[in-house]
Image (cartoon, rainbow, N blue to C red):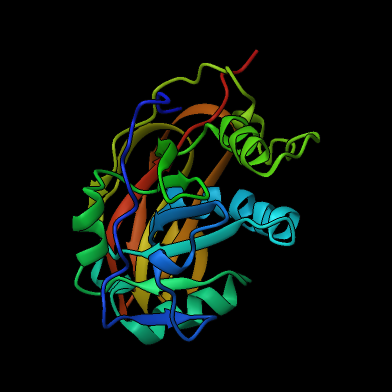
């Protein structure tokens, strides 16, 4: 969502002291003079994982032109709260831009976020220029970045068919807490898992080697199905989550 010109919402300071990955420290008041894109995320939330390809692409495309991308990791699960697990996830996911570990959720409180992911684009005077909550809106955000940088080029193409701008998607089943089995409607099924061992989803074995969000079932289109999940010894399941799929023709 683009903010009106008269809006004067200034960027909150990053909490101090704070722990960072990929950089010693950042101060928001030292970032004036170029746009800053801040995204709240959680490596155990599938919605956050699905936005990562765009964040990484924007960092690669626009860092030299002046864009600063900052990830703020605000854990929503016990599995994603450990700082060492966050650092390992940043490395495993190939994230090269700075990441703030918001262990006490001070940054999340100062921003008043109400969903993951939440991204905020600040202009070169640290005024809020564009905001988007949840997945989607990738073209709008990239065009806003280009406007602030004075650049014109084709936006990053959709990573998935369901990312196509303007596409209406069928509603998927709501996320479920804990170890869950049952009927669902979705394009994909995921689980927040930690520990060491394996789970079985509809007869397929999935090895759990680190905390994270693991895909259990994938469909080409929005599908009605039934999940049968068996969690093995040594593994904890905090939630079962669903991602959208395009309607079948």
Residue lying farthest to the top in this orientation: 249
Residue 39 x, y percent position in the rendering: 44, 54
Residue 182 x, y percent position in the rendering: 29, 40
- In this rendering, the count of numbered labels is 0
Q: Residue at x 38, y 61 (%)?
A: 42
Residue lying farthest to the right in this orientation: 153
Q: Write down the quadrant of residue 15 in the picture.
A: bottom left
Q: Residue at x 50, y 27 (%)?
A: 223
Residue 86 x, y percent position in the rendering: 41, 77
**Residue 43 visible in rendering:** no
Residue 89 x, y percent position in the rendering: 49, 75
**Residue 54 visible in rendering:** yes
Q: Residue at x 55, y 59 (%)?
A: 69
Q: Residue at x 66, y 52 (%)?
A: 58
Q: As rendered, which of 51 and 225 lies closer to the eye?
A: 51
Figure check: 214 above or below 173? below
Q: As rendered, which of 127 and 185 lies closer to the eye?
A: 127
Q: As rendered, which of 159 and 69 lies closer to the eye?
A: 69
Figure check: 222 above or below 39? above
In the displayed structure image, the side of residue 105 where residue 204 appears, left or right: right
Q: Quadrant of the N terminus?
A: top left
Q: As rendered, which of 118 and 202 lies closer to the eye?
A: 118
Figure check: 241 above or below 29? above
Q: Quadrant of the C terminus?
A: top right
Figure check: 71 above or below 145? below
């Amino acid at each position: 969502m683009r903010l009106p010109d008269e809006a004067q919402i200034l960027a909150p300071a990053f909490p101090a002291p704070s722990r960072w990955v990929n950089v010693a420290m950042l101060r928001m008041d030292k970032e004036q003079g170029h746009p800053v894109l801040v995204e709240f995320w959680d490596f155990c939330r599938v919605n956050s994982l699905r936005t990562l390809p765009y964040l990484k692409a924007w960092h690669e495309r626009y860092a030299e032109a002046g864009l600063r991308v900052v990830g703020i990791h605000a854990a929503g699960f016990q599995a994603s709260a450990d700082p060492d697990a966050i650092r390992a996830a940043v490395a495993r996911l190939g994230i090269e831009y700075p990441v703030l570990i918001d262990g006490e959720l001070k940054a999340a409180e100062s921003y008043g976020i109400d969903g993951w992911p939440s991204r905020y684009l600040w202009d070169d005077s640290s005024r809020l220029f564009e905001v988007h909550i949840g997945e989607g809106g990738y073209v709008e955000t990239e065009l806003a970045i280009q406007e602030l940088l004075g650049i014109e080029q084709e936006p990053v193409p959709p990573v998935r068919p369901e990312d196509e701008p303007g596409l209406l998607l069928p509603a998927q089943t709501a996320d479920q807490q804990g170890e869950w089995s049952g009927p669902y409607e979705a394009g994909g099924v995921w689980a927040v898992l930690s520990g060491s061992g394996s789970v079985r989803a509809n007869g397929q074995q999935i090895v759990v080697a680190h905390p994270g969000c693991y895909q259990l079932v994938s469909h080409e289109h929005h599908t009605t199905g039934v999940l049968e999940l068996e969690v093995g010894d040594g593994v904890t399941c905090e939630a079962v989550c669903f991602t959208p799929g395009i309607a079948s023709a």
